[in-house]
Image (cartoon, rainbow, N blue to C red):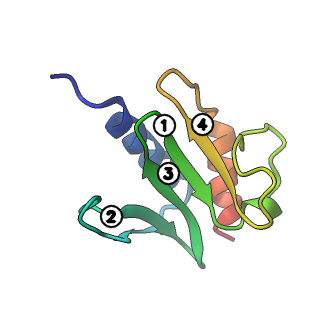
Amino acid sequence: MSEDWREARVEQIRQLIVAAVPDVVEEAKWRKPTNPDGVPTFSHNGLICTVETYKDKVKVTFAKGASLPDPAGVFNASLDAGTRRAVDLKVDDELDADAFSELVRAASM
């Protein structure tokens, strides 16, 4: 059985976050029987983002995404939320690594 594409995607996202903010703190929160590993959260001067896996996508939710500049249009979900913004990535979606890293850096300030 091949590796779940979502695991590879989460690892790619984790690597981009750590490269963008080397002092980032990763924690697993919200553990429950249906998700014993919990939700990866990344913080630096407050919560940067969470990374959740769903059947058809990986969702990266930025806690204060609505206040971040996104000239490359990386955000594609929760666009009408008052505070947060998200990036939904499906199996074949491309992620603009440079623009994503800029969002992470901006969110860590």
For disc 1, the marked residue is: 57
Horizontal and vertical percent for residue 34?
27, 59
If the image is split into quadrants, where does the N terminus sit?
top left
Q: CA distance from mark 2 to mark 4?
A: 25 Å
Horizontal and vertical percent for residue 21?
54, 61
Q: Residues within 10 Å of mark 1 (few under 14, many from 20)?
A: some
Which mark is on residue 97?
A: 4
Q: Are marks 2 and 3 in contact (CB under 8 Å)?
A: no
Camera-near label (1 vs 4) is 1
Dividing the picture into quadrants, the one containing residue 10 is top left
Dot 3 or dot 4: first in sequence order is 3
Q: Amino acid at mark 2?
A: Gly
If the image is split into quadrants, where does the C terminus sit?
bottom right
Q: Residue drawn at (78%, 38%), measured in percent from left and top? A: 73
- What secondary structure is found at the residue carrying circle 1? loop
In the image: residue 2, left or right of residue 58: left
Out of 24 and 83, give the one closest to the viewer.
83
Dot 1 or dot 4: first in sequence order is 1
For disc 3, the marked residue is: 19
In the image: residue 15, left or right of residue 63: left
Out of 100 and 28, give the one closest to the viewer.
28
Q: Amino acid at mark 1?
A: Lys
- What secondary structure is found at the residue carrying circle 2? loop
Out of 7 and 12, give the one closest to the viewer.
7
For disc 2, the marked residue is: 38
**Outermost residue toward the bottom?**
45
